[in-house]
Image (cartoon, rainbow, N blue to C red):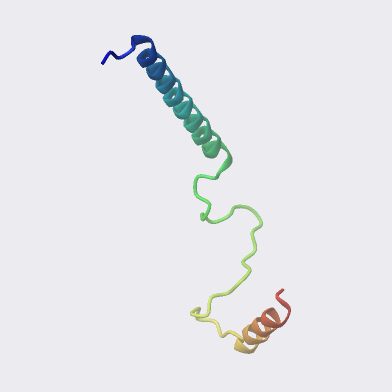
């Protein structure tokens, strides 16, 4: 049985082209992700940021009735 040289070279050329395109697209996606996504999305915001929710374990007293009424409103309306 004889292996055709031309067929093997076409297969290798296709494989090389496929791997090159895959690595190139991976590199482009990685660069775009680094440019568009923030480095640390959970860091403390700068500027005029406002804290929205107070923690329950804080030393200040909290109004649990307010939490329960908002939770009930959320379950009823979904907002």
Q: Which residue shows up at 54% across the image and 82% down it? A: 60
Quarter in which the C terminus is drawn: bottom right
Q: Residue furthest left?
A: 1
Q: Residue at x 54, y 45 (%)?
A: 38
- How many discs mark residues in the rendered view? 0
Residue at horizontal 58%, vertical 74%?
54
Image height check: is 74 above or below 22?
below
Work out whether 58 lies above or below 4. Answer: below
Q: Nearer the viewer, residue 22 or 2?
A: 2
| Picture coordinates of residue 64, whole percent (x, y) | 60, 87
Residue 8 is situated, as x and y percent measured from the top left of the image, at 35, 16
Q: Position of residue 48 (x, y in %)?
A: 66, 57
Q: Nearer the viewer, residue 54 or 69?
A: 69
Q: Residue furthest bottom?
A: 65
Residue at left offset 58%, top offset 40%: 36
Instruction: Kindly indicate the quadrant of the structure image that contains residue 66.
Output: bottom right
Front position in the image: 68 or 61: 68
Q: Residue furthest front?
A: 1
Q: Left or right: where does residue 19 sit relative to residue 54? A: left
Q: Is residue 73 above or below residue 20?
A: below
Assign the N terminus to one quadrant of the image.
Answer: top left
Pick whichever, 65 or 48, lies toward us: 65
Q: Quadrant of residue 67?
A: bottom right
């Amino acid at each position: 049985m004889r292996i055709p040289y031309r067929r093997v070279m076409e297969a290798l050329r296709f494989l090389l082209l496929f791997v090159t395109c895959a690595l190139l697209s991976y590199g482009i996606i990685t660069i775009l992700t680094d440019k568009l996504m923030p480095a640390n999305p959970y860091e403390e915001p700068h500027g005029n940021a406002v804290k929205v929710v107070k923690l329950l374990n804080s030393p200040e007293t909290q109004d649990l009735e307010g939490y329960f009424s908002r939770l009930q409103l959320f379950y009823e309306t979904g907002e």
